[in-house]
Amino acid sequence: MTNEPGPRGTLATAAVDRILGPQREEYLHDAQLLITACRDLITETGSVDPPVSLILKRAGLGSRAFYRLFPSKRDLLMAVLEASTEALQARIRSRLDTIPDPATRIHTWIDTFIEHTTSTPADGTASLILDAPRLSAIFPDASETLERRIIAPLHEALGGLRRDADTDANLADATVVYDMVASAVVRALSRRQPIAEPVRAHLHACTTRVIEGPDQGTAAA
């Protein structure tokens, strides 16, 4: 005989949901206020480490609400990083999902990444990219996981273009393209300048060479 509880009935679950429902919505609302406040401060100041006092003032909440939802500011920063990553990923996916040709998807990924990170300051992505080394030091595992989510559509497009199962090689090439484009974005943001068209064209040309690989490039020569 065990003391394990039996399966939860729908009436019992409904009763719990009914009791916690309003409180749950309140917590979600407060969490979003804190995430938005932190993200806006990051965008305005360019720092990924705004003081908790400023975050609370901007959100209109007290410290009790903060620590009820986030054990530390580190946890809030992680939530902001995740939200910004999701926004970028959603924009990339929405653009690429309408394009059947893998090569075009790859080049559209480049343009979408550049447009979102340099023209959409409200979600804090630009500041987060500029401070990527610091974020990687704070969240080594999480940063890598979130980065992979941005690279994933590129990785998938390479697999579709090459029609092979060498996912390691495709992932390595997708990462090269990501690093190249992200570096160009960081340089442009640090100089407070848009990415010039010749630079964008060069990124596309370099990506084409990565896609083709050394063997095809030699054959073409």
Image: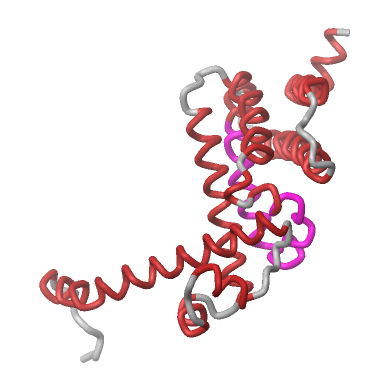
Extreme residue toward the left, this view: 11
User: Where the C terminus falls, by quadrant?
Assistant: top right
Residue, x 61% and y 77% (percent of image)? 53
Quick one: 208 or 41, which is closer to the camera? Answer: 41
Q: Is residue 22 magenta?
A: no
Q: Is residue 181 above or below residue 190?
A: above
Horizontal arrangement in the rendering, residue 101 relative to residue 98 (left or right): right
Between 164 and 171, which is closer to the camera in this rendering? 171
Q: Residue 29: percent from the left, percent from the top?
A: 39, 66
Image point 63% across, 52% down: which residue?
Answer: 124
Tag count: 0
Quadrant of the frame with the N terminus: bottom left
Closest to the observer, 117 or 145? 117
Q: How is the image coloured?
A: secondary structure
- Is residue 147 covered in magenta? yes
**82, above or below 1, in the image:** above
Q: In the image, residue 137 lies at what x, y percent?
A: 76, 65
Q: Which residues are magenta?
A: 128-156
The residue sitting at 24% across, 91% down in the picture is 3
- Give the camera-side residue of 86 and 159: 86
Residue 54 x/y as whole percent: 62, 72
Residue at left 46%, top 23%? 98
Q: Is residue 141 left or right of residue 14?
A: right
Q: Magenta residues: mostly which secondary structure? A: helix
Q: Is residue 70 above or below residue 186?
A: below
